[in-house]
Image (spheres, rainbow, N blue to C red):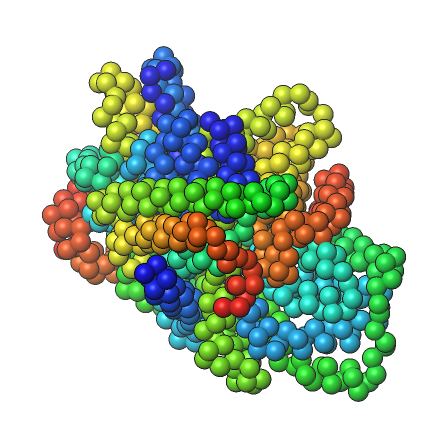
Amino acid sequence: QEFTFTFGHVLMEDTPNGKAARAFEKEVEEKSNGRIEINVIPAGGLGGDVDIIEQLQNDLVQIAIPPTATLGNFEPKLQVLDLPFILPSEEMMVKVLDGEVGRSILDTLDQHGMHGVNFWGAGFRNITNNVREITSVEDLAGIKMRTMQAPVILTQYNEWGANPTAMAFAEVYGGLQAGVVDGQENPIANIVAMKFYEVQKYMTLSSHAYHGYAAVMSENAWNSLPDDLRAIVVTAFDNARDLARELTNEYEAEELAKISSDIAVHRLTDAEKEAFIKGSFAVHEAFADVVTPELINSIYAVTGAGPK
Amino acid sequence: MFEKFDKALARLEDGSMIFLMAVAICLTFLQVVMRYVFSAPLYWAEEVVLYSIIVMSFVGISIGIRLGSHISVDLLDALVPEKHIPVLRMIAIVLGILFAGALVYFGGKLFLNTLDRGQLSPALRIPVAAIYAIIPVSGLLSLFRYGYAFVQLRQGKQIAASEENLRAM
Amino acid sequence: MLSGLLLSFGGLLLFGLPIFAALAFAVVVAVGFWGPFDPVIVPMRMFAGMNNFSLMAIPFFILASELMRIGGLSQRLVDLATVLVGWIPGGIAAATVLSCLFFGAISGSSPATVIAIGSIMFPALVAAGYDRFFAIGLITVAGTLGPIVPPSIGLIIYGSVTGASVGKLFAGGVGPALLIGALLIAACVIFAIRRGYPRQDFPTRAAFLLAIRRSAWGLGLPFLLLGGIYSGIFTPTESAAVACMYGWFVGAVIYKQIGVDELKSILKSSGAIAATLLLITAGASAFSWLLTITGAPGNLSSQVLSNTSDPFTIAALFNVVMLVTGFFLDSASAIIVLAPLLQPIAAQVGIDPVHFGLITVVNFSVGMLTPPVGLNLFVAMGVSKMSLRDVLRGCLPFIAIMIVALILITYVPWITLWLPDLIYAQ
Ligand code: NA
Ligand code: NA
């Protein structure tokens, strides 16, 4: 073969995106008649998301699907996608991420030694906790939330009256069980994988932020590909993205049915959601300068969900 | 000249180790108090603790060389006749110099790459390159230590070694 | 490249480079001469290998035990242990194992358990007349109970990479931990009787009360730590920092043994010890990155499996693969690399995922005891001031006991599963 690319990610093989990575590998190897070989290393074998991005920047790894929130440490504009309710629904998420706005966001990665191809994702993040059922911003008051280390998410929970704190992912289960922290937010896939539902009483299907993964290639790998192979790779990325989204939807429906005997599930009503969205604009505003007002407004223009 | 520099450097290394260790402990404890008593956890505490201990560990490379406290396998010592032991020491020191050189070169490269790409730390939002700078610096400190040991060995001095040093500090 | 890596590592180690440097530099040499990779990966992985908050338990517990040693807490606890169980044959040794089980219930980490228990019990065992090989071997091996008794970082990682229930895994850890504890205690009693280790006289009521009174502050610590963890005030890692504060308070304010100068020197020496250990984790992290990206563990397990389909043999071969991997990888990386490969195959031949999780964690606990990368050994060197060779010599009989326990745990699923089945029966 002419090209060998290492594809590193932190997800388990049997998760939707883990399966999509394998499908991508298969498609690229077949369609390129073996001119490209993909070596998938799943489950954090090469390190965490930040580590894998750094390895990709140094061309030690050629393909990765890091969360947009983590990429925010490298390119501040990426943080726009973690603003609460900036992508108010699945439909709008597809419109923004797969459209021109998504492309312009991916292009900002060029100056960081990466080529952004498209957006995969693990579904929307939801809130679980042990204190009370959460149906409004006010319900979050005083709840100790473990979150990812991302300024947007910290600001969001501070703005909503909760107490966000960092905690190593591997310690979250024990932390929730003992009560060091009261709650956490994650897409259903992670809540199931880490068994958080075993140690949490309430889950609110808030879908407040899309847990998106940007599919990226190292600058060197992308530039080295001739046009015919590039086309094959890009098509495979798109197919894998669609597969990941489809599998995520199936997976969430199945798993939700399974865990709903262990945890009380509340889906936000339209009115409750509307109130949450109203409570999010302050967070958007706080980050307008960081992610640029133009970018926020271009997303509002697609979704029609900006402040009136 | 070597001796004076050695003493000054040792004080600096020891001082930063004490400081970083104290910061890590106090902050971790403070975090518990802030979260449990005041319900106001410090979102940056964990990151500062981690970076303190990591920087401390890199500083610990040259401290460990000075004190001879790094853990190694002394298998050959038992097999080689007494009079050849200095040769073994010399080989170990040369390898150490090469390793320290690699730390300077590739650590420096990592520092420059990261500086160039503007990566920020998750909580504090400080440039990660600033933290990575400790890697080539620790390499330089180690180069000095191994170089000093090289000179001492050439002069026929015994190199300070092993655990007693560590405990006797 | 793989043989290049292993050869350079062996050579560098033999010619006197410290273990951490040999691990890291072997990767530089291997990718520099044979590999398509930029050696910049080495400082990158060294940094990332230490960038894990759970690891902070190591420097914190080292500091805590130094504070307790210098501050006089350790000695008083040792005196108490001697009074309480010194009259039973092998009593103090058995108490050591019990302490590890007890401490394991608050700590998820194996080296942290060795430091915390070892720095108190090693001097006690030696003072009571046990030979130092026996003493350090027992402590080093019993320390592996830390991550087998719940809570356990290893089991959490296993649960997250395989999808097994962490709650069931924790429950599953109780049986194997009790088995290992019982075997070790039995060994202590037998050793003690056969070698005629001295016993103390049965304590008088006055001596007993005095020892209790003198060690009251020390006895408060486990209650503080356990209470704090189980009531959610702090995490197991944070508990190490709480232990430091407590140790400093008692040593400085109550016993007045720790002044500013002592504190500085304790911070300096424990920082230096912690750094040497964390650096080995750093070097091992670079090493395991290269092993992983070259697919070595996967190849090893598929080669092993190509010869058989018999469940009994497969289980045995898995143990061999994990024990061999454990020589080079620390237990967290080893679980991340191997569990997703092996667990599905184990499930096909009918091994329950929770059962397999405990097999995995016990295997990599043995890995903490095997050179060249065996953190427990290095911690034990610090605790006992003995050479690596001597510590290893002391460990060998107890490692044999661990292997016996591993075989029992592998082929008697009930040991692991009785408790999860009881708790989660529906
Ligand atoms: Na434990
Ligand atoms: Na080992």
Any part of residue C353 in sight: no
As rendered, which of C298 and C255 lies closer to the eye?
A: C255
Q: Reply above or below: A238 against C100.
A: above
**Total numbered badges shown on the rendered structure:** 0
C266 horizontally vs A134: left or right: right
Asked if C227 appears above or below C165 in the picture, the reply is below
Q: Is residue A247 left or right of residue A286?
A: right
Residue C417 in sight here: yes
Q: Position of residue A183 (x, y in %)?
A: 44, 60
Closer to the camera in the image, C410 or C55: C55
Q: Residue furthest top?
A: A33
Viewer-closest of C95 and B86: B86
Where is residue A41, by image quadrant? top left
x 45%, y 80%: residue? C260
| Above or below, comparing residue C7 to residue B117 in the picture | above
Using residue B7 as the reference point, say whether residue C269 is left or right of it: right
Q: Residue at x 33, y 41 (%)?
A: B106
User: What quarter of the picture does the N terminus of chain A occupy?
Assistant: top left
Q: Position of residue A200 (x, y in %)?
A: 50, 57
- Write the residue at 74% across / 69% down: C127
**Which one is in front, A222 or C3?**
C3
Q: Which quarter of the rendering shows the C terminus of chain A? A: bottom left
Q: Residue at x 38, y 20 (%)?
A: A37
**Residue A270, percent across and down?**
30, 52
| Residue C154 place in picture, x, y as percent | 57, 49
Q: Left or right: C150 with respect to A18?
A: right
- Which of the 4 image quarters holds residue C131? bottom right
**Farthest bottom residue in view:** C206
